[in-house]
Amino acid sequence: MSAAENMPELPETPEQDIRRLVDMQKAAHIAEGPMTAARRIDLIDRTIALLVDNGDAMVDALMADFGNRSPEGTLATDVGGTLGALKYAKKNVKKWMKPSKRHSMFPLGLLGASTRVEYQPLGCVGNVVPWNFPFNLCFGPMGSIFAAGNRTIIKPSEFTVHSSILTKELCEKYFDESDVAVALGGPETGASFAKQPFDHLLFTGATPIASHIMRAAAENLTPVTLELGGKSPVIVSDSADFKKTAARVMTGKTLNAGQICLAPDYVMVPEGKVDEFVAEASASVEAMFPTLKDNPDYTSVVNQRHYDRLQGYLDDAREKGAKIVEINPANEDFSQQPHHKIPPTIVVEPGEDMKVMQEEIFGPILPVKSYKTTDEAIGYVNDHDRPLGLYYFGNDKGEEKRVINSTTSGGVTVNDVITHIMQDDAPFGGVGPSGTGAYHGFEGFINFSHAKTIFRQSPFEFAAGALRPPYGESTRKMLASIIKK
């Protein structure tokens, strides 16, 4: 029996129930006032306990949803990889909450006036969670959301039904509904969710869906954080160690079978080095996965829809003349299998008319193309949408600096892929089509806070009334002293 045939029914949350949750959390936010540091830390501690106590249940849920999802991969990404951001937020929340003293306009600061910025909780934050890392992307942002003193309502993906149901069960066990709630359902529920009057809306998912999210949020002028994706490039320098480079690229590309917003989407190598890279990539996959078909370490594509989409990319590339290198160390037959596994596959020197170069791949397919000069590689990246991640491999510091400074991306990892997202003291987010806003670290706290300026006027009346009519010569002299270069 396939995973799809064994999938439980996902209940739909009516729109009026979602609105009830939003209204309840917003009312609770007003009634409580700004959360104390102790309350924020308690919510973070509850999230940490939820993850630590239920890792095995999360492994089982994702195994059921994917058909095969590496247990160690789940523990590393959805459980262990989520804890760091939460623990870092817990450690720093008291420091982040402190008001920030600012400079007051001259000469008022000398006469007793003062300016400060206080970081005020927004209230109720909606979180639309994708299917690829359903626990990480549900509970990870809570570090920033709770540190900022907010409540949250979660809309999990309908593609990972077991994980979504488990998310609701765990949230109901570890939190009061006025702090954390879950709205289950499919696309209709998602559409209803996005148009609610949240104080902030976080969406992680595909770029084409993001425009619908923004349009729905605009009805209430709800601010949004969009964590999207796109085609994250790898630029391999002639100075790179190709064995290490290929191993690190393929580790990132095969993690979760490439179903990662930050997965390397295509690789650019110096002219004449394509065959070397393909050979090293094949060797690295063989070392990691001597077999694939029944190997629990190698994750399945999530469902038939995405399996067909990825096979369509390969069919399109073949029809248009691309060389296809399937990395299948044991030469296994994938035409008959209980799940939706696709061997890691390299598309050599793809054309721009191919779908693999036009759409985010989100699977274990990797185009590899050559470039003549570094400027050509940089130009290619800049001619396309700004990616969520950019990866440079090499030992030429000058070239590295030129690549980083001459391109725009959400983040950069040098001599590895994906791992900049793991840095808990640094913001994670996209730019342009790959996203807007960020979480993790202090920037995440700021993202889910309102920075409120508070100015206290000088006690001296002549300072406070300097621009009060009637105006005369003294007023003109004062203005003349201000309006100058």
Image (cartoon, rainbow, N blue to C red):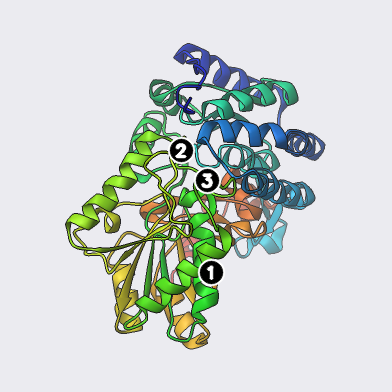
Please tell me which of labels 2 and 1 falls first in the chain.
Answer: 1
Q: Where is mark 1, residue-wise? A: 247
Q: Secondary structure at mark 2?
A: loop
Residue type highlighted by circle 2:
Val
Residue 45 drawn at (x, y percent): 79, 38
Up the image or down, 141 lies above or below 407; here it is: above
Residue 449 drawn at (x, y percent): 61, 43
Residue 137 drawn at (x, y percent): 57, 41
Where residue 443 sits, quadrant-wise, is bottom right
**What label does residue 299 carry, if any?**
3
Q: Where is mark 2, residue-wise? A: 302
Which residue is at the front of the view, 311 or 263?
Answer: 311
The quarter in which the C terminus is drawn is: bottom left
Q: Secondary structure at mark 3?
A: loop
Residue type highlighted by circle 1:
Ala
Q: In this view of the protein, can residue 95 be seen by the observer?
A: yes
Residue type highlighted by circle 3:
Thr
Residue 307 drawn at (x, y percent): 37, 41
